[in-house]
Image (tube, rainbow, N blue to C red):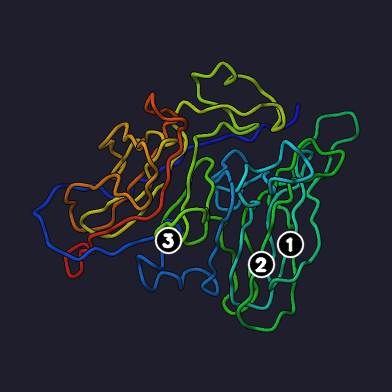
Amino acid sequence: MTITWLRALMCSVLAAGAAGPVVAHAQTRAEETASTATNYPGTASIYPGTASITYVGKWHTTEITRNWSGGTAALSIWGNSSAPEPQCRSGTNVPAAKVKLSFNGTGVRWIGARGPELGMAEVFLDGVSQGIVDAYLDVIPAGQPGADQIQAELFGVSGLADGPHTLEIEVLGDKNRASTSCVVVVDAFDIEGTPSGRIQESGPAAVTYFGTWIQGDDSRPYSGGTAAYSDAELDPGIVPTKDDPRYFQSVGIAGLGYGWNEGVTTRAVFTFSGTRVAWIGSTGPRMGKANVYVDGQLVQAGVDTYALTEQTRVPLFTSAVLRAGIHSLAIEVRGDKNPLSGGVSIVVDAFDVTPCTGAVGC
């Protein structure tokens, strides 16, 4: 029996927020791609060569069902809308899934996975194609169930000029004829240089996406130019919620069709330091509902983002005044909607934070 990639939810509560007196401070904005260094200057030094990772397109993040380096991995099957494999094509106007690592060093290695359901990706170093990586591998004799090689090196290079470089991995939506799907896994990157070390696939992110999100969407006039959105989509091979009759099926990633999640597994979690936070998103005729959590506690259920006409850069939620310190804000995509809406999309554009400069705990 082939493996089943699971959708999982992990949400780390960093601090408990308590209401405090109103403090007048100017707001600062963090985009949906914000990094830890943006919110906590100086922390980038804990990542080798101050590396950063950017995801574009459709990814299932924080995969936790294997012994990944650091505990999680990101995976995608989605090439562009004309990818060779029809089941591995992204939707209209959705770019092929791509991840870009920016780093300083003399070498780099992409750590991922090989197996009977793994697909193909093209690798670019400093913008120049390094060829196509085929991650298919049937490690069990023919006619028997396959297995995976976890934390496998899929690409590596040494001897680069010491300095800044980029490594890009583009999901092709293609596969070996013997493979059952197009899965591409990003587990970690090993960086050579001074300092050297491993950076996980999540990078130094302050906004972490759980479940399936389309990131880097630039089709609207978003704050900062891009946004992330999700439809709480039930992707092939990712286990549905317990309410779904398919929950107890055990099938490979190519075995499930598309459907809609009942709404408990897809979240965007923003970690920030401040005394107040606002979620900036979009409203429109195809928008859905979301639950909002502050420091792990549900504070507003069923935020309805439906509107007759589309509008971007809309404040959809503003927290109460919080105790000065580090907090988390989670946007949970429910997968349901206002009866008048034609869809269930939820957009994460940016976050407005009231800083706590000089306050105890910041």
* Residue occupying the far top of the picture: 245
Q: CB under 8 Å between callouts 1 and 2?
A: yes
**72 above or below 304?**
below
Rounded to the nearest whole Å, what is the CA distance between mark 1 and mark 3? Answer: 25 Å
Q: Is residue 195 left or right of residue 277?
A: right
What residue is drawn where x is 58% and y is 46%?
A: 59
Q: Considering the numbered disc 3 on the image, is that residue within a helix, a strand or a loop?
A: loop
Which numbered circle lies on residue 34?
3
Q: Considering the numbered disc 1 on the image, is that residue within a helix, a strand or a loop?
A: strand
Quarter of the image where the C terminus is located: bottom left
Q: CB under 8 Å between callouts 2 and 3?
A: no
Q: Is residue 43 left or right of residue 195?
A: left
Please state which amino acid type lies under the numbered disc 2. Answer: Leu
| Marked residue nearer the N-terminal end (1 or 3) | 3
Please state which amino acid type lies under the numbered disc 1. Answer: Val
Q: Considering the numbered disc 2 on the image, is that residue within a helix, a strand or a loop?
A: strand
* Residue occupying the far front of the picture: 309
Q: Quadrant of residue 291?
A: top left
Q: Nearer the viewer, residue 208 or 92?
A: 92
Please state which amino acid type lies under the numbered disc 3. Answer: Ala
The residue wearing badge 1 is: 123
Rendered location of residue 336, percent (x, y): 42, 27
What residue is drawn where x is 60% and y is 19%?
A: 246
The residue wearing badge 2 is: 167
